Amino acid sequence: MRGNAFKSCLEPDDNFVRNLHRSCCIVDAHCDILVTLRESNCCLKQQRTGGHLDLPRLVRGGVKVLFFAAFIRPDIPGGYLKRALELVATFYAETDQNQDYLVPVLSWKDLLVTVEQGKIASILTIEGGEALEGSVEVLQMLYHLGVRGLTLTWNYRNPLGDGVAERDTCGGLTKFGKTVVREMNRLGMLVDVAHLSAAGFWDVLQISSAPVIASHCNSFSICPHPRNLSDEQVRAIAAAGGVIGVTFVPAFVCAANPSLERLLDHVDHLVEVGGIECVGIGSDFEGFDGFLPGLEDVTRLPCLTRGLLRRGYAPHEVRKIMGENFLRVLGKVLPASR
C-alpha cells in the first residue's frame, strides 16, 4: 500500500503508525493562532474546547516545527505595520511564557538545536505584504525582529502585487514587489506564493534565487478553487526545489464533500505531478471556520500519517511529507546561524 491522544484515531493494532508518527519531524508551515490569541485574549498554554490548536494539543499532535503567521487583514484599522508589530509582540509573549515548549527560530542552527531538545521550533512569518508599507527598510527591520517568512499578498492587491481575487487585473508583482523578493533572498527569508495571482506567481519563480514555498495550497486539478495551484505551478515549484503545504481548509479540499480521504487525493496528485519532494503540510489551523472531517484539530495529525501509509507511501516518504521536505527548504533558505 502506496501522550495517548493517538488512541482515538489509530486502529487497535497500529503501534507501527504511532511509532512512525512520533519519529517524524512534523512541520506545519501555516497556522493563524496569533490572531486567535490576540483577538480572544487567551493564552496558548490554555487548553480550549474549540478551535484547532493550543499548546497542550500541539504537544499531543507531535508538531516539531510550527510557522506562526502574523495575518494582516487588509481592512484592519490603525495601520498595517502597527498590526504586524502587535502580532510579533504576541509571538514573543507566548514564547517567553512557554520557554519549556517553544523556542523562536532565527537560523538553521536554532532549528536543529530546538528539535534536538524536544521543543517546538517556532518560526515567525507575516501573511500580507501590506505590513511593509512600501519600504524595504521595514522588511529589514522585521527580519531583525525575527520574521523569517513573508506571504507576499493575501487575496487582494497590495503594494507588492495582485492577489488571487483580483480577477479584473490579474496583475503580477510590482517593481517594489520584485525588489522585496530579491531582498528576502539576500536576507534569508522564505518567499511564500500562497494567495498570489498567477502572474505574480510566475514573476516570483523567475526572480527568486532560492526555493519558494506555497505554505497552504492544494491542487486545482482535484478541487478547482482559485486558491489552489495548477499542475504547471506545481511543476514549477518542484523544479525550483520548493514545497507546497497541503492545507486543511475544507473549501480548498472539496466543495461538495471535504474529508481526510479527499485531502489524500490532493497529496497523491501533487506527488504524481511534482514528485515526493514537493509536498508538505500547511494546515491553516485557526485560519478558517469549522474543520476538515478526519483532521478536526492538531491532535488528529496521526490520522494523516496513517492515511499516507494506507495510500501506499513508504515510511521514508511519509517522513518527507510530514516534515522533511520543508526542513530541506528551511536548511537552504534560513541563515546558517545568528
Image (spheres, rainbow, N blue to C red):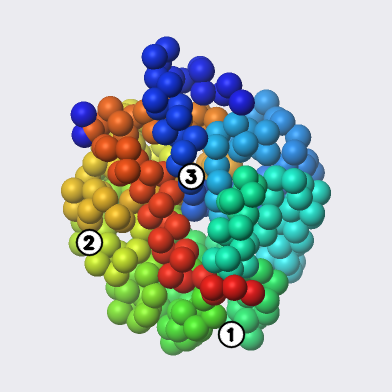
Q: Quadrant of the N terminus?
A: top left
On residue 169, the disc is none
SS for callout 1: helix
Q: Mark 1 or mark 3: which comes first in sequence?
A: 3
On residue 26, the disc is 3
Q: Looking at numbered disc 3 in the image, what kind of residue is underneath it?
A: Ile
Q: Mark 1 or mark 2: which comes first in sequence?
A: 1
On residue 235, the disc is 2
Q: Looking at numbered disc 1 in the image, what kind of residue is underneath it?
A: Val
Marks 1 and 3 in Cβ contact (< 8 Å): no
Marks 1 and 2 in Cβ contact (< 8 Å): no
From the image, tell me which residue sits under label 1.
Answer: 136
Number of numbered discs: 3
Q: Nearer the viewer, residue 178 or 279?
A: 279
Where is residue 312 drawn, in percent x and y?
23, 33
SS for callout 2: helix
Picture residue at 19% right of the left edge, 53% below the top: 273
